[in-house]
């Protein structure tokens, strides 16, 4: 009786897996970091740190890779915000220093974005992950370290806060 030998299955190297993760999620990680840190250079640093940590821990991925990466990114942003350097940086920009607008701008155009960014961090994260990054409720809960029902309550509270703030705007003007 002759046994057939199966060819060994090809396994991606760690570098290949990291490259695939970066190609798939780099923009989303950068956006999340930017919304948390509100500075592009710091967001890029946080994104780089996220992928370095991900590379070291590739063997620990369980479930959604996206949720796993977003959790790492949030933790990197929190670490940066806790640092002494971050607390002493004035990230405000003078209007004269901003580049000219690429198109006509109406102040009402960005009211929703401004209100989302003005939310407390935990509510902002819930809104951004669910609607901006289009993550499922399960992925959001996993990334934030919450139960699904806990995430659901946080998202409902964030929506309520947004609704209250947006009702103050006069949309008919």
Image (spheres, rainbow, N blue to C red):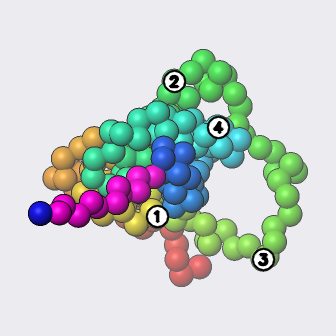
Which SS class for mark 1?
Answer: helix
Residue found at x 41% / y 56%? 10
Classify mark 1: residues with Cα within 10 Å, few (<14), some (14-19) or many (20+). few
User: Residue 164, image x and y in percent?
Assistant: 37, 60
The span from disc 2 to disc 1 (Cα, nearest Å) is: 25 Å
- Horizontal relation, residue 133 to residue 89: left or right: left
Q: Nearer the viewer, mark 3 or mark 4?
A: 4
Q: Which residue is mark 3?
A: 104
Does label 2 or label 1 sit earlier along the sequence?
2
What's the mark number on residue 45? 4
Does label 4 or label 1 sit earlier along the sequence?
4
163 shown above or below 154: below
Residue found at x 74% / y 73%? 105
Classify mark 3: residues with Cα within 10 Å, few (<14), some (14-19) or many (20+). few
Residue found at x 83% / y 53%? 98
Report the magenta stretch's main SS: loop
User: Residue 97, image x and y in percent?
Assistant: 86, 48
Region rendered in magenta:
2-12
What's the mark number on residue 132? 1
Q: Nearer the viewer, mark 3 or mark 1?
A: 1
């Amino acid at each position: 009786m002759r046994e057939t030998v199966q060819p060994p299955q090809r396994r991606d190297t760690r570098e290949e897996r990291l490259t695939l993760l970066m190609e798939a999620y780099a923009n989303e990680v950068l956006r999340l970091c930017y919304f948390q840190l509100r500075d592009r250079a710091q967001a890029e640093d946080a994104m780089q740190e996220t992928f370095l940590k991900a590379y070291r821990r590739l063997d620990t991925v369980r479930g959604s890779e996206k949720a796993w990466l977003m959790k790492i990114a949030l933790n990197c942003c929190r670490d940066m915000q806790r640092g002494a350097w971050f607390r002493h940086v004035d990230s405000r920009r003078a209007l004269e220093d901003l580049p000219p607008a690429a198109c006509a701008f109406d102040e009402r155009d960005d009211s929703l974005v401004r209100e989302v960014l003005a939310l407390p961090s935990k509510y902002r994260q819930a809104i951004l992950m669910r609607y901006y990054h289009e993550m499922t409720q399960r992925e959001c809960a996993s990334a934030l370290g919450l139960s699904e029902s806990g995430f659901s309550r946080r998202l409902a509270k964030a929506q309520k806060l947004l609704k209250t703030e947006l009702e103050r705007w006069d949309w008919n003007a």
